[in-house]
């Protein structure tokens, strides 16, 4: 029996975390009747698309089963207050809020307030900060609102987030600065699949390429033969970009698929603020409004010096606020999946019923040597990124970019002598990046050779100076995995193996953390309860604050953290199935201040 109070014991934490993170438990979990096409499915209420708006000091949320349909696909969903996404919660900086969450499911549930600074026992992670919300029970989260900006909330129980258990959260600034804009819209990006999330996990575990319909064949593409043989020797695929994609996903904007023709109205001459949230389970989106520049004013809810771009890649769990001044007419808001397997679409229009024609999907990007951790070989000037032949370069260009002597290279990509001794070597680690370099200047896969302006982390500068603190300690964490077995971890150790060995910070300690990605997939790494500063080339006072950091394939990224929020906090990859397969840890900050 789990303890009833929010502060759980070490023994109960170990028991609960192991049950949540252990994949064997997932594979053995029986499906409910609705997931197997049983009679109960038709009795479920239909979830409404989009979000109601809730505000005030007491907010009531109810989690329940529902049926959801869009674009010819339909299936089970977890709806909150009857909608997918759940309600937009609008709060004000400085208030105190009580969020009463009732679980009407037949399984435990929870809500994590993503990016919010709050007492750790209300952070909403079962087994780390509280026991979870049992069926039929109500849990009240109560905390002061200490910040402003764009955030979101989602379940941290099982895989419920994939099936609709998420929603947007906006906190208005106490100084009234949000009133500078004529329109203020939330643009919440996500995806829907008729498959049960545990079924997706089973398919990935059995065959990690199950959903990949874009893999190269023996004769397909422009890749030179020698390079193709090299990829084959390494048992890796240059189209290994997204684990789950448009073969089963319909990509959503505010719960609406492309065929729903979602409209966001404006008047010509208005300044429109778009609060872009990536609330998906697994999808990186490349977002643009063709012909309309985007002025980025916030990253992860924190103000940055405005920077104007034409497109940006938003990783899972990140948020960006942009300001646009569109001319009269209709303009497509395009959220293209990074692997170009589909897109979410909405219409920013000055006249109801007038819609834009979205552009076609672009060519599929292909991984390069830089994405394998050969970042020291730089042919692009983009911090280790190399030329992708699918973005305009012909076979000769691609061949010359790859023309190097590979005869002495370890084609197994598993030279464990390159790893520090604290990284566990075993079946959960099938790749070691030989020469990982800082890729903070890389704009994201598929965007390094487009002809227009694209946002990079190196463009971000904090709008107001941060307190200066001397770095007291440095640490390095390696992102590791075995794609064929679908095993993911930090430092070669899956979450279930480290529940009694958290990452420890002293209260108010200033630490520089370097993340080294030993895999060929980008990982959005999220630290609960804190903001950290990106070490991105900005001066110390203007390093931008974020709570989620995308670490590019075969590269590294560094942040500075002041560990001033005491308690136990989740630290994980925000790709849902990577976290569920083991890429998660607990950060503990002690002692509590007096």
Image: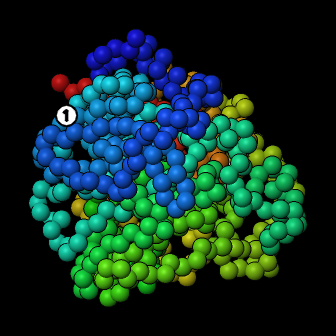
Q: Nearer the viewer, residue 513 or 244?
A: 244
Q: Is residue 80 above or below residue 1?
A: below
- Indicate left or right for 410 with 28 as reference: right
Residue 128 location, x and y as percent? Answer: 39, 27
| Residue 276 in the image: above or below residue 132 | below
Q: In this view of the protein, can residue 485 be seen by the observer? A: yes
Quarter that holds the N terminus: top left
- Which residue sits at x=56%, y=71%? 447
Judging depth in this view, the residue of 505 and 48 nearest the camera is 48
SS of the residue under disc 1: strand
| Few, some or many residues within 10 Å of mark 1 (<14, 14–19, 20+) | some
Q: Position of residue 105 (x, y in %)?
A: 40, 31
User: In this view of the protein, which residue sits in the foreground, 105 or 120?
Assistant: 105
Residue under the image location 52 percent in, 62 percent down: 71
Using residue 38 as the reference point, say whether residue 212 is left or right of it: right
* Total residue callouts: 1
The C terminus: image quadrant = top left
User: Residue 154, relative to residue 296: is it above or below?
Assistant: above
Q: Which residue is mark 1?
A: 142
């Amino acid at each position: 029996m789990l303890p009833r109070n929010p502060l759980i014991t070490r023994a109960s934490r170990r028991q609960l975390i192991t049950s949540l993170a252990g994949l064997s438990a997932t594979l053995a979990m029986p499906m409910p009747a609705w997931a197997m096409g049983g009679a109960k499915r038709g009795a479920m209420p239909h979830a409404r698309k989009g979000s109601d708006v809730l505000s005030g000091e007491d907010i009531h949320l109810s989690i329940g089963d529902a049926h959801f349909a869009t674009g010819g696909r339909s299936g089970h969903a977890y709806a909150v207050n009857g909608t997918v996404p759940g309600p937009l919660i609008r709060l004000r900086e400085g208030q105190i809020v009580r969020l009463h969450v009732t679980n009407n499911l037949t399984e435990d549930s929870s809500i994590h307030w993503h990016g919010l600074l709050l007492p750790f026992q209300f952070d909403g992670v079962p087994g780390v900060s509280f026991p979870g919300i049992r069926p039929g029970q109500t849990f009240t989260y109560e905390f002061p609102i200490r910040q402003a900006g764009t955030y979101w909330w989602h379940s941290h129980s099982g895989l419920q987030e994939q099936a609709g258990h998420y929603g947007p959260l906006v906190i208005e600034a106490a100084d009234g600065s949000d009133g500078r804009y004529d329109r203020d819209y939330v643009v919440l990006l996500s995806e829907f699949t008729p498959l049960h999330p545990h079924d997706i996990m089973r398919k990935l575990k059995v065959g990690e390429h199950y959903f990949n319909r874009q893999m190269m064949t023996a004769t397909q593409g422009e890749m030179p033969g020698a390079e193709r043989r090299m990829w084959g020797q390494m048992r890796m695929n240059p189209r290994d970009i997204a684990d789950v994609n448009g073969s089963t996903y319909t990509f959503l904007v505010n719960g609406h698929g492309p065929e729903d023709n979602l409209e966001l109205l404006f008047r010509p001459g208005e300044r429109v603020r778009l609060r872009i949230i990536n609330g998906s389970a697994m999808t990186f989106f490349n977002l643009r409004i063709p012909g309309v520049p985007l002025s980025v004013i916030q990253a992860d809810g924190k103000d940055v010096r405005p920077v104007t771009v034409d497109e940006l890649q938003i990783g899972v769990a990140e948020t960006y606020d942009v300001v646009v001044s569109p001319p009269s007419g209709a303009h497509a808001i395009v959220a293209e999946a990074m692997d170009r397997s589909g897109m979410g679409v909405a219409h920013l229009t000055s006249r109801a019923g007038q819609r834009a024609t979205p552009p076609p999907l672009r060519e599929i990007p292909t991984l390069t040597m830089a994405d394998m951790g050969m970042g020291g070989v730089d042919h692009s000037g983009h911090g280790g990124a190399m030329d992708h032949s699918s973005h305009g370069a012909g076979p000769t260009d691609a061949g010359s970019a790859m023309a190097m002597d590979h005869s002495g290279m370890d084609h197994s990509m598993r030279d464990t002598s390159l790893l520090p001794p604290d990284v566990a070597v075993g079946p959960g680690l099938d790749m070691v990046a030989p020469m990982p370099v800082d890729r903070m200047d890389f704009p994201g896969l598929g965007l390094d050779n487009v002809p227009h302006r694209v946002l990079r982390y190196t463009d971000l500068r904090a709008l107001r100076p941060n307190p200066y603190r001397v770095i007291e300690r440095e640490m390095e964490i390696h992102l590791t995995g075995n794609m064929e077995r679908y095993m993911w971890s930090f430092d070669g150790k899956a979450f279930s193996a480290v529940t009694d060995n958290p990452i420890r910070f002293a209260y108010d300690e200033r630490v520089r953390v370097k993340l080294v990605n030993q895999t060929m997939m980008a990982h959005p790494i999220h630290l609960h309860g804190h903001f950290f500063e990106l070490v991105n080339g900005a001066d110390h006072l203007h390093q931008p604050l974020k709570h989620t950091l995308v670490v590019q394939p075969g590269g590294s990224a560094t942040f500075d953290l002041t560990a001033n929020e005491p308690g136990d906090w989740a630290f994980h990859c925000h790709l849902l199935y990577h976290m569920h397969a083991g890429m998660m840890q607990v950060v503990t900050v002690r002692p509590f201040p007096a």
